[in-house]
Each structure stands twice: as C-alpha cells, then as structure tokens.
Amino acid sequence: MNKIVISSVVTALLVLSGCSSKEPVVDAPVEEAVKAPVQEVAAVKTETVSDANTEVLGENGMIDSDSNEMNMANLEKDMQTVYFDFDKFDIRSDMQEKVSNDAKLAKGAASAFTIKLQGNCDEWGSDEYNFALGLKRANAVKKALVAEGVDASRVTMVSYGESNPVCTDKTKECWSQNRRVDFKLLP
Amino acid sequence: MKILFALMLVISMSFASDATIEVIKKVESLPTIAVEDSSISYDDTFKMKFFKSLIADLNVLSLFNVDRHYLQTHFNDTDVLVENKDMNYVLRYKMYEDDNGALNVELKLIKDNADVLVKSYRIAKQDVYMFVSHAIAYDINEFMGAPSIEWIKRKVIFSRIVESKKSELIIADYTLSYQHVAVSGGFNVFPKWANKQQDAFYYTSLDDEKPTLKYVALNEGTSKSIIASDGMMICSDVSDDSKSLLLTMSPNGQPDIYLFDIDSKKYKKITSYGGIDVNAQFMNKDTIVFISDRLGYPNVFSKKIGSSTVDQMVYYGQSNAACSAHGEYIVYKARESSNAFSNNTFNLHLISTKTDFIRRLTATGVNEFPRFSKDGDAILFIKNYKSQSSLGIIRLNHNKNYLFPLKHGKIQALDW
C-alpha cells in the first residue's frame, strides 16, 4: 500500500490587515527580459525533501520461493522484449520472430499465467500522449499474440510512458532501447 | 485628423487584450524598488531566506526593476537608506516571533518618503514563510493596480520520478521553496486537484492490477479508489464545479476520452477514433480540446461533447502532443525539429481561437505540460534542459518567463 502522508496543508493562515491609501497607479509597461534575474532567484531555497520512508511492498513480493514462482520468474526471462521505432507502434519486421517466440511460450510453458504487457517510451515527453503511445505498443503486441492463438483474456496491459527507462544516456541507441514492450507474468 | 486618431485608438484598443500578440518594445522603463529588512527576531540565515523569497516574488510580479542588495535598517526610520534614495519604491519589513512562535511580518511600502501601503501578516509556522512572501507580492500587485494574480497564493501539486517506476506526489508553492511529500512509495503519476479549494486531489496509481484513479482528501487524511481501467487511466481535467472529470481510459486497449460523473459514478465515451485521443481539457462546460493523432501525428482538436464533429485547432508544429485551454486561448507543446535522433526542442505556443496569431512562449530545451492558471494570467509548465527539471511560470501579459529548478528527480506531471 502506498504510504499516504497527509499534509496539514498550509491554507494561507495569513491575517491581513487592510490597506488604506491608494497611490496613483504606475503604468506597468510590458517589456522583454532585461537582465534575467531568474537564475539568481533560483538561489531561493528550492527544496526540502523529506526522508520519507519510501518502502513499499517489494517487487510483487517474491516471498515464497515456491517452485511455481521460480518457474514463473525463469519463464519471464525467456520472454523477449519487443522494440519499436520512434513515434511508432506497429511491430517491425525484425521483431516478428520474437513475438512468435513469446506467443509459443505463452501458449506452452507459461500457459498457466496471466501476461502483463508493459508499454514504454523514450524520454521525449512526459505527457499523456507518450503514455498512450506506450499503450498502443502494448496493444500491438497483444494483438499479435492473440493472432498466434493466445487467449486475449489472459493478457493485461499497462503503460509506463517514459517513466521506466532501462537506459538513461542521451544517445539514440539508448532511446531505442527504451521504446519497448516488456513481459511480466502474473499468477 | 481626429478621425485618424480615433481610428488608431480603436485599432490599438482592439489588440490591447490579445495575449497572442507579443509586446516587444519597451514602452517605458519599470519603476525601481528596493527592499529593506528591519527584522528583530530570527537568525541571519532565515532573514536571508525570507529576503530572497521576497525578491523572487517581486521579480515575478514583473512590475518593477528589483534591486537585489540586502540592506538592514530600523523599521521606524523616517528616511530610506541612503543607498535607496533614488529608488521609486522602498519596501521595508520587520519580522518578529510572537509568544506563540508564530511568524509576524509588518510591512510598509514607501514612495517619496511617504508610507503608501501599510500591512501586517501572521503565519503559525516559521517554515512556511514563503506563503507570507507570496501574500505580500499579491498585495503589492493589487496596490499597483495590476490584474489580479490569485495564482501566486495557490499550491502546485506535481509528481516526481525518483527512479524507475518510483515516484512521489508533492504539494509545493509555485517557487518550489515549500515542498511537502503527500504520497510517497509506489508508482503514482498525473496528480490533479479535485476542486478549487485544493483540499483534495486525484492521481493515477500504477501499482495495482490495473491503472487506478485514486482520490485523496487532505483534511480527512483518507484515500479511496475511484475507477480503474486496463492499459491507461488518467484524470486530464476537472470541471469548474468539481462534478465531472475528463478521463483518458482504455478498457479495450484503445485510449479514448471519457466524461465521468462524480455523483453517479457513470461514464460516457466522448471520442471513438481508432488511434490515440488523450489530454482532454474543458474549454467550457460543453466543449473540450484534446490531443489526437487522427492526422497521422499528434495535434490539438476540439469537440462539442455529444457531437460527432471534430475541429482541428492548430496548424503549426509537427508534433503537438500536449495542451491546456483557458477561454479562447490554447497553449500547446510543439516539437520544433523532426529529427528522431538528436536533442529535440519542444516549445510552448499560444494561440487564440479568434485570431490567426501564434506566439512562441519558450526558447530552449524540452518544455511541456503547460497549465493555465485559473484566471488565465499565467501558465505553469515543466522545463527539462541539460538534465535539469524546473517548474516554469510564464507571465503572458509581461512576456517574461521565470524558472524554479528542482534539485533532484524529474517532474512528470503537475497541476495548480
């Protein structure tokens, strides 16, 4: 469960006294940035990060090392990540073989598990559109799996947008590794 | 001659209120202001913190040329300090701690050796001093007769990615000086204030079996699940009366926009295009703007709720993947280069639905997640530039941007 830290929000507990005199309004002309005081302003204390306990439940808690779970973890490793082109969500021809392999596993050794497809994007945008792109990628893989005989009801999806990168360098190789759909097995 | 003059007057008046028109020429230089500290309580570190906060706020007002020298004097001295004798305005304040430990601030604005504005403030805790500073700026803005800046007193809520699939939801002031972690642990994104009072918010939890919209009431300290969807679940906007939500959901793997009624818990599908429809924002009660890839690339469209007609709103930019609306104005994010393999620039642009003008609002880096203030006076956005994530604020009528950097992590989404 998420730890909900409820803020005793500062509802501007300000007691204001009245102002009396009304000065002639000084013209407030618009102007371009003159000496960019912005950066200096930034010297204002910008952060008070609490050391709040960020402990959450462990990664779906591998508590029991029971054989079924071990089996699941091993199978998960065998399932191959599918990669995508920039701003695209159709499955590339060089990825077809991987998808077929994943479908085989899904129908065979992993047939007892639910498959969660996790759609991911590169770093170009944290907005909803990027999340939707990740989802469309997951959906493309789902359709391909279903076309190869995997039961659609066994497949769930989630998009993580750009928030789950495997690589954080600023290179095109790195970005291409992040445009992907990962497989996660659930009991 | 009179007719010509009248004509020019009419023309200039007709353009005066259009925010898409960028005013480049400086008509008149801004009045100068200096700040004098007369505080008796508190140590030097805190005095300096408060001073810096006040200077930052006065800068953001965009009404003054702000002198940034820290000078101290006695509150009741009749003359301003000799260093400040040529200033148009001098803002003098005195901070003191009362018996209850509350922070009190007395303030006067001096012009031509006369006190033209006198006020006092009190806040229960010293560590939220920045809200006093914002309140002072608000009052000075009012005093100067500038359009109201209610937003300066509002709180910002944002999600910060701390590592892969881990984030925090943080409540802050607009300068990020005050930060309070409201939800920590887990993977939570897209926070959105639930009402104007800012005492509750929605967010998306990605830790559950399906992406789930959750609701947190701050005063009660409670959290509950509202609705879940496979694939995607985001609250994009909340109606003015807080009764309806615009959601992006994908129950069948297809991201579409839905209108959700808080009381009945029923939802209605608003878009049904086979590609991507996301990021819906109320333009008014009956009309939304949203992002769709129905032309093969993301762009801004509008639609009347219940109608099947969709209008393209933006004709500039190759990839316009986010937007926010306020009345006739739409601010959107546009990719300025189509190169998939170099550092892209994303800038914010402002359009009016009533004119053809487009105004570029930012110049460098990746600028995204624009959000209008409730009064439309300012736009808050996220700037990512050279591995630094900042909160930016655009003063539309002053043609100025201010940045407040985040020390670590990356801002994912925000609302205010």
Image: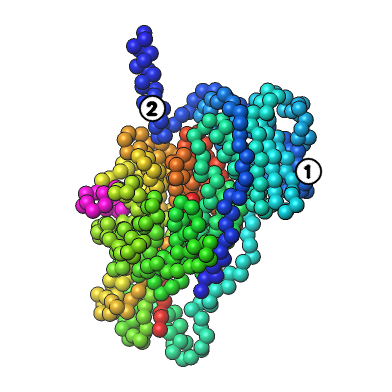
- Is B392 displayed left or right of B279 in the figure? right
Instruction: Give the x, y percent position of residue B34.
Output: 68, 32
At label 2, the amino acid type is Phe
Residue at the top extreme of this rendering: B1
Q: Residue at x 66, y 26 (%)?
A: B111
Q: Are marks 2 and 1 in contact (CB under 8 Å)?
A: no
Which of label 2 and label 1 is nearer to you?
1
Q: Which residues are magenta?
A: B291-310
The residue that mark 1 highlights is B40
Quadrant of residue B9 within the rendered picture: top left
Residue drawn at the location 46% of the way across and 39% of the way down: B377
SS for tag 2? helix
Neighbours of disc 1 within 10 Å: few (<14), some (14-19), many (20+): few
Is B125 magenta? The answer is no
- Quadrant in the picture for the N terminus of chain B: top left
Up the image or down, B54 lies above or below B308; here it is above
Circles 2 and 1 on the same subunit: yes
Q: Is residue B166 left or right of residue B32?
A: left
Give coordinates of residue B250: x percent, y percent: 32, 65
Q: Amino acid at mark 1?
A: Ile
Q: Residues within 10 Å of mark 2 (few under 14, many from 20)?
A: few
Q: Residue furthest left?
A: B308
Look at mark 2 in the image and give the residue it sits on.
Answer: B15
The residue shown at (58%, 69%) is A54
Relative vertical location of residue B396 with respect to residue B254 in this rendering, above or below: above
Please report the residue visible at 28 percent of the width from the left and 76 percent of the height from the top.
A152
- Res B83 visible: no
Label total for image: 2
* Place of residue B273 in the rendered image (x, y in percent of width and height, measured from the top left): 25, 57
Among the two numbered marks 2 and 1 on one chain, the one whose residue lies closer to the N terminus: 2
